[in-house]
Image (cartoon, rainbow, N blue to C red):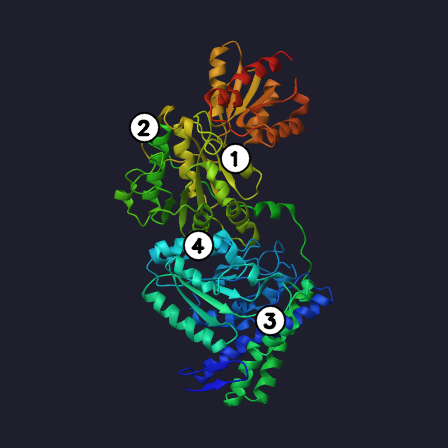
């Protein structure tokens, strides 16, 4: 079909579009508008709690979604209802999500569009906005590695472009030439903050220049321009994988959410954009070209209205969701059936660093879909040489040097998991995880609980002091993560444990933070099986058995405890190496404490808020009648880790431990 049409406010060029495509565009455009209008009525009636309106922006969601193939992933925002309806998600499931019913996608655990669905290849946002951009990189990377010729589309608003995640994601996508369509919906305001206070450039599309990314500006209210332009671009990306940045000029006609209102928007601006309504203008175009008529429109609206009502009735009749403690706790992690791989007799004496490297390499050989990412890990082999020689063995597609962007790379790892792959990320130092904290605790940790999407990601964390590295390279920050439901935390102290626990962590489909103490890398040796083998998470190791006291520790501190006992041969102690902090082996702890009647916990972490506090509380709550003395904790000083050797030795609890141990025995 060849036709051009200019309404008073939007020019439509429908060249080469068939009549059925033009009609389908209208149906997909009208449906989210009518759903929104009904939702706002229900909001005023108090039947839903919140609504983020996309009225005035529907053409972007619909046009982009129709331009993509159904098997290609889309990562939308909270104003992209048209993505979900164009992908033909049953309305009762969307309504169930918004009403907090079990038929929704998050079992009542999240609201709005904070969910994903593998069935429809949609990955929803989290409130922090930025992380989904890096996740799109990961999905696109998987597509590229598998030679699938697919495009991944991800949405953000002009406000979201101010976040560091935006810049990290664009840089990663550009460096790796990933087939990502970055869609910016520039709708004038980030909540109440106008664009003039968000960025200082004429067009956000200009930001693509700095990253070497092709960019385009599109009239976001013109459904035909959106559809045709995006379709042409994605067809080309499939042939020549690369990122493309699209800035859609549009406007938000409602408040940030309905309670916000729009009083901060000048009325003349509202009047200008109301004349550019994407639904009304396109409707006039179709009627002017005699593609539809009034009867068609009346019938279509009646069909959509009936569908909305029928699906609402399904939800109104559905029982309110009920809390079940067992269900809630069981959905924090994806179930993992631990498989024991046993080794033969052959062993070599290995340092901790070598055991980790060997376990990682054997895991790479076992899992063809495993990708390792990190700074300087390819030809250089990482700062601790864990991956030295890996490039020659596995190639640069699987051993990937990354830009310095912890947040973006952790998000990329999550995207790989969504696309069915595995990822190991080496943090150059555990301290640097703070630059990627948000995606760890809010994306990796919560996705399975929210919408049953596991995060098959291991974060390797070289950590710890006693090496004179100062405040930014010496932290043992495991307590940041043992506090967060949805994360597993592993902290081995011996080469044998390190190799077996790392292989299990990689097999586990849940996110695991794997702490590796730098001071132990080359100072601890042990006979380690040469074969691939696994050890279970959540099972402590009893290194010594005694009757006087229970000593509980992990990491480098377990070696300090053993050295203290070597100097005090008269002390008969159970020594428990926790090995994993989440899950925690409380059974071994309780059995030992009930036997000895005394417990002391030694950790390298600072005292306040460390895991020793929780273990102490657990012992007191569950073994109180067996205790002959108070539970004691020994930890580093509540200061940052100092650099000078004398200061660091005063900071660490190595010397204080023996004194507290003797005091507890004498209690």
- Picture quarter containing residue 383? top left
Neighbour class for label 3 at 10 Å: few (<14), some, many (≥20)? many
Question: How far from the left and from the top, in percent, is residue 611?
Answer: 57, 31
Question: How far from the left and from the top, in percent, is residue 495?
Answer: 39, 28
* Residue at the right extreme, as displayed: 45
In the picture of the structure, the residue carrying the numbered disc 3 is: 55
Q: Which label number is shown at residue 345?
A: 2
In the picture of the structure, the residue carrying the numbered disc 1 is: 478
Which residue sits at x=70%, y=68%? 42
Which dot, 2 or 4, sits closer to the camera? 4
How far apart marks 2 and 1 lie (CA) works out to 34 Å
How far apart marks 3 and 1 lie (CA) works out to 45 Å
Which residue sits at x=57%, y=30%? 587
Could you tell whether 262 is left or right of 563 in the image? right
How far apart marks 4 and 3 lie (CA) works out to 28 Å
Q: Is residue 532 visible?
A: no
Which one is in front, 663 or 624?
663
Question: How far from the left and from the top, in percent, is residue 205?
Answer: 45, 64
């Amino acid at each position: 079909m060849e036709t051009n049409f200019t309404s008073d406010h939007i020019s439509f060029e429908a060249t080469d579009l068939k009549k059925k495509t033009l009609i389908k565009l209208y149906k997909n455009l009208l449906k989210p508008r009518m759903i929104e209008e009904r939702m706002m009525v229900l909001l005023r009636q108090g039947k839903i709690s919140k609504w983020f309106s996309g009225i005035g922006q529907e053409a972007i969601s619909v046009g982009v979604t129709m331009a993509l193939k159904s098997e290609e992933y889309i990562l939308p925002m909270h104003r992209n209802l048209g993505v979900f309806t164009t992908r033909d998600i049953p309305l009762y499931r969307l309504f169930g999500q918004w009403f907090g019913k079990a038929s929704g996608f998050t079992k009542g655990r999240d609201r709005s569009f904070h969910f994903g669905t593998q069935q429809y290849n949609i990955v929803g946002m989290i409130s922090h906005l930025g992380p989904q951009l890096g996740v799109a990189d990961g999905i696109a990377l998987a597509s590229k590695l598998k030679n699938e010729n697919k495009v991944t589309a991800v949405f953000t608003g002009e406000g979201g472009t101010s976040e560091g995640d935006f810049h990290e994601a664009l840089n990663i996508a550009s460096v790796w030439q990933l087939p990502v369509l970055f869609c910016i919906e520039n709708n004038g305001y980030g909540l109440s903050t106008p664009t003039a206070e968000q960025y200082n450039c004429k067009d956000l599309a200009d930001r693509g220049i700095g990253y070497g990314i092709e960019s385009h500006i599109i009239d976001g209210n013109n459904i035909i321009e959106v559809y045709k332009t995006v379709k042409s671009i994605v067809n080309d990306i499939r042939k020549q994988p690369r990122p493309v940045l699209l800035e859609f000029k549009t406007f938000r006609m409602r408040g940030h959410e309905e309670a916000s209102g729009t009083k901060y928007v000048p009325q003349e601006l509202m009047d200008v954009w109301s004349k550019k309504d994407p639904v009304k203008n396109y409707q006039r175009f179709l009627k002017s070209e005699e593609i539809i008529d009034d009867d068609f429109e009346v019938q279509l609206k009646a069909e959509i209205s009936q569908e909305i009502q029928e699906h609402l009735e399904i939800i109104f009749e559905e029982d309110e969701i009920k809390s079940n403690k067992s269900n809630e706790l069981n959905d924090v992690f994806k179930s993992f059936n631990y498989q024991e791989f046993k080794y033969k007799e052959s062993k070599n004496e290995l340092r901790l660093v070598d055991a980790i490297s060997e376990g990682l390499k054997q895991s790479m050989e076992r899992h063809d879909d495993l990708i390792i990412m990190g700074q300087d890990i390819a030809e250089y082999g990482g700062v601790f040489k864990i991956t030295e020689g890996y490039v020659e063995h596995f190639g640069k597609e699987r051993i990937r040097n990354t830009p310095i962007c912890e947040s973006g790379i952790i998000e990329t790892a999550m995207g790989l998991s969504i696309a069915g792959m595995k990822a190991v990320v080496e943090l150059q130092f555990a301290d640097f995880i703070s630059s990627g904290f948000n995606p760890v605790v809010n994306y990796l940790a919560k996705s399975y609980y929210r919408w049953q999407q596991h995060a098959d990601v291991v974060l390797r964390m070289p950590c710890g002091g006693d090496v004179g590295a100062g405040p930014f390279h010496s932290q043992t920050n495991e307590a940041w993560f043992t506090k967060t439901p949805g994360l597993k935390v592993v902290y081995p102290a011996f080469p044998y444990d390190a190799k077996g626990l790392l292989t299990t962590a990689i097999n586990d489909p849940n996110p695991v933070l794997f702490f590796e103490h730098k001071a132990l890398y080359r100072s601890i040796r042990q006979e380690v099986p040469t074969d691939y083998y696994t050890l279970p998470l959540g099972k402590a190791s009893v290194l010594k058995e005694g009757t006087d006291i229970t000593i509980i520790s992990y990491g480098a501190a377990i070696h300090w405890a053993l050295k203290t006992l070597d100097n005090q041969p008269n002390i008969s102690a159970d020594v428990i190496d926790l090995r994993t902090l989440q899950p925690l082996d409380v059974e071994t702890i309780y059995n030992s404490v009930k036997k000895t009647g005394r417990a002391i916990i030694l950790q390298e972490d600072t005292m306040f808020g460390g895991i020793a506090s929780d273990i102490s509380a657990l012992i007191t709550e569950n073994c109180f009648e067996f205790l002959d003395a108070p539970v004691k904790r020994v930890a580093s000083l509540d200061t940052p880790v100092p650099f000078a050797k004398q200061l660091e030795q005063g900071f660490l609890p190595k010397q204080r431990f023996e004194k507290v141990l003797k005091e507890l025995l004498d209690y």
